[in-house]
Image (cartoon, rainbow, N blue to C red):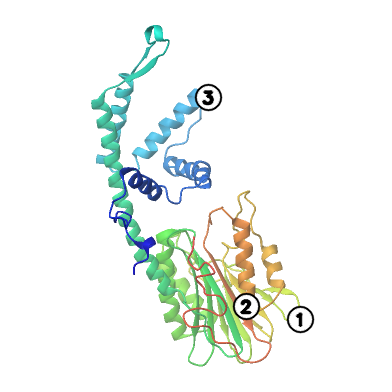
């Protein structure tokens, strides 16, 4: 028997009578306004409108803004009109101008009549306008809106394909290494992100740990990330030493990318048996190492991001992870995440959260919860990726559940969420 809540709304009820027009209208309005909230309207006016104005007018030549109220208003309207117009194709730009002219002509023919109603003392208001110009203006604007929505749907479909390709480049589960436990997640600021991390096992039992951040955002950063992934796979197969891998990636980015195509990188080569970690940090935020005996250290020797110069400036270094130690890899989107007041999450807060210790999954979830509490309704300005590596104090690592990482699933921790 079908669940009555899952039956179509237009199906006749048990009495055999179809719902009346009032009920159908109520159902339509409920569906049409689903998800609307007061907070949504507040966000629309405070944040979305300001961001839309900034994007639409950023290509207009800067000029001195009038100081008077009406003059400033009309100047902003002019700048907004030009900015919106030049975002359209030439043909659509002309149609948009015609729609605006038709709206102005309609306003020019509008009249207001007030009928006093004779002795009865009542009155009526009549607004007269031009049906022709109203129809032309509204029809053209709706037509342009439909065209732009179709373009957006097509771009969204293409971005979804790109997102799926990007998901395939990132690990969907942590590696199973005896004596070690891992937790990781990834959040994008846009549809396509530029952060990259991976766990690459080597035939000799060592594990390559990679964390990187491609320059820019969106599709360009995603393409750079894909190039970096392919290069790293090839370089590690040829020579997994940190300097050799970083040098190969640097050469590739210098050849294939322009001056804005660069990437920060932390590359570590971990020997699970001994805990030795050989690493190189090129322009990437220094990973944090929490010792089991207490204290947090930074790993890194500095250096420019890869892809900026032909020569490699970063130098490799080595350390060792003892039982109970925790290693935190992250991208700069985490400490630089802003709240509604413009305050950054901060490196000190991140170090304090790691210093509390605990299993890898618990440390990861603590950082994710603190980030959620910090940003709340503020949108992420940059991608955020977090990797926590734990060397167990004793005994083998607990294998991760099928389809996820150790602890709660990566999806539940906001992997690729906005």
Q: Measured from the top left, where is residue 414 in percent x and y? A: 52, 66
Q: Measured from the top left, where is residue 254 in percent x and y? A: 44, 67
70 vs 88, left or right, is: right
Question: Residue at the spot x=51%, y=68% of the render?
Answer: 186
Labels 2 and 3: the sequence-earlier one: 3
Question: Residue at the spot x=61%, y=89% of the render?
Answer: 179
Question: Which residue bears the numbered disc 2?
Answer: 360
Q: Is residue 103 above or below residue 202?
A: above
CA gap, disc 2 and disc 1: 16 Å
Question: Residue at the spot x=33%, y=61% of the render?
Answer: 7
Q: Badges 2 and 3: C-beta atoms under 8 Å apart? A: no
Q: Nearer the viewer, residue 134 or 267?
A: 134
Q: Nearer the viewer, residue 87 or 9?
A: 9
The number of callouts visible is 3
* Of labels 2 and 3, the one closer to you: 2
Q: Badges 2 and 1: C-beta atoms under 8 Å apart? A: no
Q: Is residue 177 above or below residue 406?
A: below
Q: Measured from the top left, where is residue 168 in percent x and y? A: 40, 74
Question: Which residue bears the numbered disc 1?
Answer: 293
Question: Which residue bears the numbered disc 3?
Answer: 69
350 vs 71, left or right, is: right
Looking at this view, name the residue that lies furthest to the top. 119
Labels 2 and 1: the sequence-earlier one: 1
Q: Secondary structure at mark 1?
A: loop
373 vs 81, left or right, is: right
Q: Is residue 94 visible?
A: no
């Amino acid at each position: 028997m079908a669940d009555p809540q899952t039956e179509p709304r237009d199906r006749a009820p048990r009495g055999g009578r179809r719902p009346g027009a009032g009920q159908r209208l109520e159902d339509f309005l409920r569906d049409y306004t689903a998800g609307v909230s007061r907070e949504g309207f507040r966000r629309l006016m405070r944040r979305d409108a300001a961001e839309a104005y900034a994007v639409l007018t950023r290509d207009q030549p800067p000029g001195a803004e009038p100081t008077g109220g009406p003059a400033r208003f009309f100047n902003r309207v002019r700048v907004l009109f030009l900015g919106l117009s030049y975002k359209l194709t030439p043909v659509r730009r002309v149609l948009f101008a015609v729609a605006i002219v038709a709206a102005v002509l309609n306003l020019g023919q509008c009249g207001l009549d007030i009928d006093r109603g004779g002795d009865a003392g009542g009155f009526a208001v009549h607004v007269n306008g031009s049906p022709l110009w109203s129809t032309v203006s509204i029809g053209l604007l709706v037509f342009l809106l439909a065209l732009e929505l179709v373009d957006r749907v097509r771009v969204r479909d293409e971005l979804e394909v790109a997102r799926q390709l990007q998901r395939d480049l990132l690990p969907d589960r942590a590696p199973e290494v005896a004596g070690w436990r891992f937790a990781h997640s990834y959040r994008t600021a846009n549809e396509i992100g530029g952060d990259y991390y991976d766990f690459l096992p080597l035939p000799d039992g060592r594990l390559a740990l990679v964390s990187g951040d491609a320059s820019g955002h969106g599709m360009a950063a995603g393409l750079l990330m894909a190039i970096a992934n392919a290069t790293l796979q090839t370089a590690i197969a040829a020579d997994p030493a940190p300097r050799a891998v970083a040098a190969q990636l640097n050469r590739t980015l210098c050849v294939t990318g322009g001056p804005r195509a660069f990437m920060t990188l932390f590359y570590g080569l971990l020997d699970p048996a001994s805990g030795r970690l050989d690493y190189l940090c090129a322009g990437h935020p220094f990973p944090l190492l929490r010792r089991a005996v207490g204290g947090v250290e930074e790993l890194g020797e500095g250096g420019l991001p890869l892809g900026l110069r032909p020569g490699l400036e970063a130098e490799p270094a080595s350390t060792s992870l003892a039982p109970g130690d925790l290693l935190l890899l992250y991208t700069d989107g985490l400490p630089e995440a802003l709240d509604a007041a413009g305050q950054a999450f901060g490196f000190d807060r991140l170090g304090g959260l790691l210093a509390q210790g605990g299993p890898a999954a618990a440390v990861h979830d603590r950082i994710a919860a603190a980030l959620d509490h910090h940003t709340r309704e503020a949108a992420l300005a940059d991608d955020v990726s977090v990797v926590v590596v734990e060397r167990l104090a004793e005994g083998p690592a607990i294998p991760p559940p099928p389809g996820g990482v150790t602890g709660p699933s990566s999806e539940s921790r906001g992997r690729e969420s906005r």
